[in-house]
Structure formats: structure tokens, C-alpha cells
Image: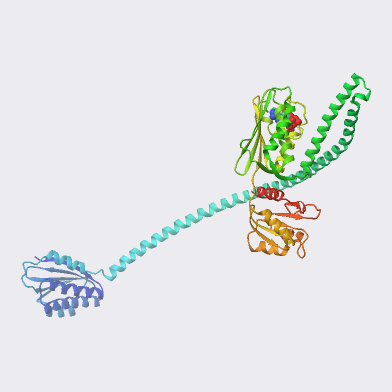
């Protein structure tokens, strides 16, 4: 019985070589001698070569029986005689029967031969035929092409979908941009209207201030005469009877009230128009609080109201304008006392790291929640709660607070009392690099000394050009500029400053603040406090 160990299809020349290699390997495995191995290989090679040279193919089976190596070649068609003739000379036995050729070679007896191992080794040597490989490659290619076609179809589908979506998006977009354009047009028109309105408002407010300022002046003069005359009439030797004296007293009181109103109006108009000149200095807080304590004494006469001033946490001094600060606190205290029938009015001070809080609280009538902001409007008084006055105190106080770089707020609970908080900046301001432009070297030294502890660095410039080159060279936070300098003067310097860089003009000239400058300080009476105050306002605004 023949054991089949491997089979090989032969179609082309590489297959012939493979058949030859396999034949030789089988012969070696079966223990044939070197020369016989070559014989077997050559016989097989000859049969195969002649087969493919006639354009046919064949199937070879490699096998073994107990005594022989057995090769079976099945040709698809007619085996070529030439090959058979050659092979028959090399093999021990060759039999051809139609398309099948059996070839045998005797092999040595070997009982230890492991045929299964031989089969495995031979099988491993069988190469894929070129055609087979080509077919497999073709199949792979076809599969890939099919896959590519499928993907292409999908891509086309996706593309179509995308185009559809794009069309939708475009439509939506154009709809939206139409809408946006319309909205924008509306917004632009609205802004124009707003600009016009605010310009009208500004003009109205300006003419109101002018009117108040003028009318107050005009009213004050005759009122002062009336007050003086009534004082004369009220003197004991004026010759008036008791009844008439009483009436003159009434006239005096009424004139006093009128004068107070006119003065209030004048104050507000001044604060509003910016004509109020602040004179900042280190104000002693304990002294100021004592003055206020004295001022409130007559206000509480005949009322069970305690005025308590607690200033334990107060700083010794505060860099501010004393007159303005006193006016604000006097206003708050007088309101607190006016609207408190009994209980306590307290003025207390608290220091935070860069601010001071002055609080006036009372246990009086309070202000209804909805009216808390309205009481800051000019002439506004809480309806039904009027106790004299003009309704100008709080708006004036708030304006002054802002001029001082601070803020005034109110908190209140109807029936329980009101708390007014005035928050003011405290301590020296701090600014990085300052350029000092002045042709007077002496005054530059003065400014430098004043800036100690305020400016991180001071750069001196003799004129506008030097200042501008310092500014273009490194970072500068503030410019202090004289106006009249030889060469590039202060006006030109101001014109050429980069946008956003603040400048303070310090000049001996009697001129208005140039538009590009944040402030103007007169040179003659410049103090460190005035300079620090101006710098603080600028740096606070910048925040
Ligand atoms: P005036 O005191 O002259 O009326 P103000 O502007 O100072 O004007 O105050 C406006 C209004 O706010 C007052 O008329 C009063 O209704 C209310 N108000 C102000 N302060 C207090 C307070 N401490 N307690 C209750 N109401 C107050």
C-alpha cells in the first residue's frame, strides 16, 4: 500500500523546480543515496518539464510503500514521450497508463521512519504556484476593488447628503445674515438716537447747572440784604412793637430757610459742573470727628437721641478734601438725626487695607426698600415722610463722595433705621514708572522727591522729545508734564502720547486742563498730597 505524503500541481517552470526539490527531499527522507536522490529529482523534473512544454499541466503525488519511493504523475491530457523516456532511464520502475505515470525507486529498509514527520516537512516545502498566487492576489484585488467601489458609492451618497445639508445651511445662513443685517441696522439707528438723546441730556443738564449757578448768585444777594435788614429791625432799639418783632422774626426764619436752599442749590451746581476745587491734604480724622460731634449737638436739642462717635479703628489721617468730607458727613448726620425721634445715631470708622469706611447709622424711620436709590435723585423726598429740607442733601453728598474717589451707599429697613456708608480711598497710591517732563532741573527734583513711595521708578526728561523717547523705549505708566518747555513743549507731548497713557499737567500757566490730560495741577502751590490725590484718582479710574 502506498502512503501518500504530498501532492503538487505543476503548471509552469517554477512549479517544475518545486517538483524537483520535493522529489529530491523525499528521496533524502527515505534514505536514498545522494546519486539516487539526484536521479529521482531529475526524472520528475523531466516528466514535468516535458508536460508543461506541451502546454499541459500535471498533478504529482509523492508517496512511499514498504520498499519503494513512489511518484504518481497525472497529466491533464497526453503525457509527453520525451519526458517518460528520460525518466524511465533514471527510475527503477516506470509505468505509463494513459494520463497516469507511476515511477518507483527502491529505498533502503528503515523501520524507524516517521512518515508523518516526512509528510509535514514535504508539505511545508510546497510553494504556492505563481498562478495560484496570482489567482489569490487577483481575488484579493477583486475584493479590494469591490470594497473600493462600495466605499465610493457610500462616499457619493455621503457627498450628496452633505451637499443637501450644505444647501440647507447656506439657506439658513443667508436667512440669519439677513436678519442680523436688519437687527444691526436697527441697533445702529438706536445708538444714533441714544447718542443724540444723551447729547441733548448733557446739554440740558449743563444749562440746568448754569441756570442754578446764576440764579443762586442772583438770589443770594437780595436774600443777604433781607437777612441783614430783618436783623436790624429785630434789634431792641428799632422801635417796633412786640407783634411786629414777632413778625420780623418769622421773616428772618423764612429768609434763613430760603438762603439755605439757595446755598444747597449752589453747592450741587458747583459739584456737578466740576467747578468745585478740591484741596486735598492729610486730614486729621480725630479732629474732624470731634468737630462733627460739636456740629450735631444743637440738632438733637429736645430729642431723646444719642449721638455716638466711635473712632477706635480710625486712621490718624486721611488724604482727602476736608471741606467735602465734612459736608458729606454733616449731611448724613443731619438726616439721621432728623429722621430719628428717639434712639441712637452712630458715626463709626473702619479701616480696610486701602480704604476707610465711615458709617452713619440711625434707629429712625428708615426708608422703604423701593425708595433707596430714588432718594439720591435731586429734590426727591420719600412721600409722606417729609421733615423739611430740600431733597438735595443726598445727591450732593454722593457727588462729593465720587469727587473724593469714593462711594456713598445706603441700606435701610422701614421702621428700623438707616445706615449710610461712605467708602473713601486710603493710603498713598502706587504707580509704576513715571516720566517727569520739565526743563527746570530743580523742579524735576522736587517732583522726584514728592513721588517717593508712590512711583516705582522716575525717569527725567528735559523736554517733550526726551519724554517721548523714554516712552517708546520702555513701559511707562504715567507722565507728569510741564506745558512750556523749549523744543517739543507740553502740548505737543500730550498730542503725541500713546492712547491710554495718563498724563497730569503741572504748570505755572493759568490755563484750563488740556483735553488730553487727566488733571492739571498749579505749580506754585503743589504739595505731595495734591499730587498723590491726583494720581490716586487716575489709578483708581484705570482699575
Ligand atoms: P432732605 O433731607 O433735604 O429731604 P436728602 O437728599 O438728604 O434731602 O434726603 C432725601 C430723602 O431721603 C429725605 O427727604 C428722606 O425722605 C430720605 N432720607 C434721607 N436720610 C434718611 C434717614 N436717615 N432716615 C430716613 N429717611 C431718610
Q: Position of residue 48 (x, y in %)?
A: 20, 75
Residue drawn at x 46%, y 57% as measured from the top left: 155
Q: Is residue 128 left or right of residue 418?
A: left
Find ligand 1 in the image and state its quadrant. top right
Determine if residue 398 is in view.
Answer: yes
Residue drawn at x 37%, y 62% as measured from the top left: 144
**Vertical placement of residue 290 versus 487, above or below:** above
* Nearer to me, 393 or 532: 532
Q: Residue furthest right?
A: 239
Residue drawn at x 20%, y 67% as measured from the top left: 124
Q: Position of residue 4 (x, y in %)?
A: 14, 66
**Vertical placement of residue 411 versus 480, above or below:** above
Q: Position of residue 60 (x, y in %)?
A: 18, 70
* Nearer to me, 185 or 496: 496
Instruction: Work out which quarter of the rendered image holds the N terminus and state it.
Output: bottom left
Count the marks.
0
Choose top left, top right, bottom left or bottom right for residue 420: top right
Amino acid at each position: 500500500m502506498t502512503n501518500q505524503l504530498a501532492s503538487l500541481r505543476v503548471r509552469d517552470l517554477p512549479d517544475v523546480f518545486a517538483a524537483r526539490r520535493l522529489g529530491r527531499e523525499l528521496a533524502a527522507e527515505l534514505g536514498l543515496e545522494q546519486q539516487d536522490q539526484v536521479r529521482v529529482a531529475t526524472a520528475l523534473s523531466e516528466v514535468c518539464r516535458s508536460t508543461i512544454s506541451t502546454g499541459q499541466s500535471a498533478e504529482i503525488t509523492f508517496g512511499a510503500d514498504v520498499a519503494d519511493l513512489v511518484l504518481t504523475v497525472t497529466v491533464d491530457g497526453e503525457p509527453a514521450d520525451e519526458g517518460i523516456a528520460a525518466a524511465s532511464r533514471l527510475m527503477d520502475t516506470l509505468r505509463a497508463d494513459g494520463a497516469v505515470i507511476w515511477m518507483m525507486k527502491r529505498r533502503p529498509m528503515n523501520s524507524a521512519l516517521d512518515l508523518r514527520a516526512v509528510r509535514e516537512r514535504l508539505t511545508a516545502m510546497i510553494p504556492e504556484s505563481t498562478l495560484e498566487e496570482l489567482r489569490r492576489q487577483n481575488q484579493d484585488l477583486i475584493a479590494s476593488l469591490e470594497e473600493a467601489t462600495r466605499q465610493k458609492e457610500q462616499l457619493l451618497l455621503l457627498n450628496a447628503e452633505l451637499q443637501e445639508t450644505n444647501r440647507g445651511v447656506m439657506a439658513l445662513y443667508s436667512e440669519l445674515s439677513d436678519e442680523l443685517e436688519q437687527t444691526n441696522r436697527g441697533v445702529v439707528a438706536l445708538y444714533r438716537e441714544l447718542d443724540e438723546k444723551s447729547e441733548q441730556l448733557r446739554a440740558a443738564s449743563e444749562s440746568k447747572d448754569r441756570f442754578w449757578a446764576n440764579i443762586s448768585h442772583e438770589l443770594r444777594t437780595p436774600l443777604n440784604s433781607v437777612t441783614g435788614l430783618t436783623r436790624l429791625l429785630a434789634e431792641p432799639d428799632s422801635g417796633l412793637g412786640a407783634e411786629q418783632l414777632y413778625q420780623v422774626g418769622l421773616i428772618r426764619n423764612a429768609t434763613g430757610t430760603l438762603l439755605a436752599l439757595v446755598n444747597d442749590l449752589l453747592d450741587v451746581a458747583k459739584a456737578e459742573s466740576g467747578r468745585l476745587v478740591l484741596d486735598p491734604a492729610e486730614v486729621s480724622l480725630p479732629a474732624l470727628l470731634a468737630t462733627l460731634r460739636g456740629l450735631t449737638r444743637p440738632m438733637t436739642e429736645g430729642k431723646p437721641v444719642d449721638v455716638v462717635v466711635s473712632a477706635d479703628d480710625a486712621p490718624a489721617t486721611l488724604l482727602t478734601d476736608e471741606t467735602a468730607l465734612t459736608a458729606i458727613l454733616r449731611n448724613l448726620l443731619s438726616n439721621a438725626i432728623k429722621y430719628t425721634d428717639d434712639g441712637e445715631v452712630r458715626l463709626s470708622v473702619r479701616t480696610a487695607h486701602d480704604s476707610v469706611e465711615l458709617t452713619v447709622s440711625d434707629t429712625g424711620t428708615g426708608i422703604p426698600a423701593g425708595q433707596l436709590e430714588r432718594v439720591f435723585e435731586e429734590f426727591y423726598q420719600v412721600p409722606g415722610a417729609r421733615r423739611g429740607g430740600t431733597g438735595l442733601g443726598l445727591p450732593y453728598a454722593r457727588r462729593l463722595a465720587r469727587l473724593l474717589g469714593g462711594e456713598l451707599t445706603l441700606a435701610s429697613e422701614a421702621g428700623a433705621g438707616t445706615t449710610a456708608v461712605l467708602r473713601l480711598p486710603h493710603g498713598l497710591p502706587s504707580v509704576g514708572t513715571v516720566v517727569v517732563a520739565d526743563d527746570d532741573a530743580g523742579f524735576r527734583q522736587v517732583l522726584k522727591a514728592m513721588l517717593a513711595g508712590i512711583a516705582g521708578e522716575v525717569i527725567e526728561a528735559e523736554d517733550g522729545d526726551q519724554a517721548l523717547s523714554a516712552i517708546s523705549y520702555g513701559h511707562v505708566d504715567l507722565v507728569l508734564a510741564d506745558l512750556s518747555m523749549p523744543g517739543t513743549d507740553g502740548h505737543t507731548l500730550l498730542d503725541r502720547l500713546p492712547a491710554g497713557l495718563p498724563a497730569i499737567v503741572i504748570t505755572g500757566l493759568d490755563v484750563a486742563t488740556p483735553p488730553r490730560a487727566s488733571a492739571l495741577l498749579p505749580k506754585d502751590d503743589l504739595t505731595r498730597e495734591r499730587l498723590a490725590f491726583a494720581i490716586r484718582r487716575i489709578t483708581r479710574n484705570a482699575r
